[in-house]
Amino acid sequence: MEIEVMEKQLKAVADLNRLKILACLKKGEVCVCDFTSVLNISQPAVSQHLRKLKEAGIIAERKVGTWKHYRIHEEQTELMHNILASIEEQPTCDCNIGGICMEE
């Protein structure tokens, strides 16, 4: 693994809010609207955390209407695979019921 990729990934996960995001994403895809209440921070702050995780290749996004939905990227480096395996899944992202964003 390139050392620059390792640095980017380690910096991306070296934040409590980003670790909470990853814990939520372990259950599956989550709408961006879920994270504001889970993290108790503003939507712009959530977007910055998601951007850092996306730039590091840890998460992927897809657009659904006006909302973006995030998931853990299928392919991970061995480093990220090990980090993700050590993060406990959190059932705290629950405004997304049955795949339908409650904010829509």
Image: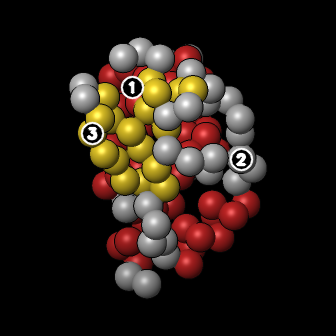
- Disc 2 versus disc 3: distance between alpha carbons? 24 Å
Q: Quadrant of the C terminus?
A: top left
In the figure, 79 relative to 34: above or below? below
Crowd tier of the residue under label 3, counting other residues whose Cα lies within 10 Å: few below 14, some 14–19, many 20 or above: few
Return the residue nearer the eye: 13 or 71.
71
User: Which amino acid, by three-letter code, is at mark 2?
Assistant: Glu
The spot of residue 65 in percent (x, y) is 25, 29
Element marked by disc 3: strand
In percent of width and height, residue 34 lies at 50, 25
Q: Is residue 11 visible?
A: no
Residue nearest the viewer, comparing 34 with 11: 34
Location of residue 54 in the rendering, given as x and y in whole percent from the top left corner = 35, 52
Q: Is residue 58 left or right of residue 4?
A: right
Give the amino acid type for the residue marked by disc 1 in the picture.
Ala
Residue at (38, 82) in percent of width and height:
2
- In this view, the mark in front (2 or 3): 3
Residue labelled with disc 1? 45
Locate residue 104 relative to residue 41 in the image: left or right: left
Tag nearer the camera, 2 or 1: 2
For residue 89, the mark is: 2
The residue tagged 3 is 63
Q: Residue at x 42, y 54 (%)?
A: 59
Quarter of the picture holding the N terminus: bottom left
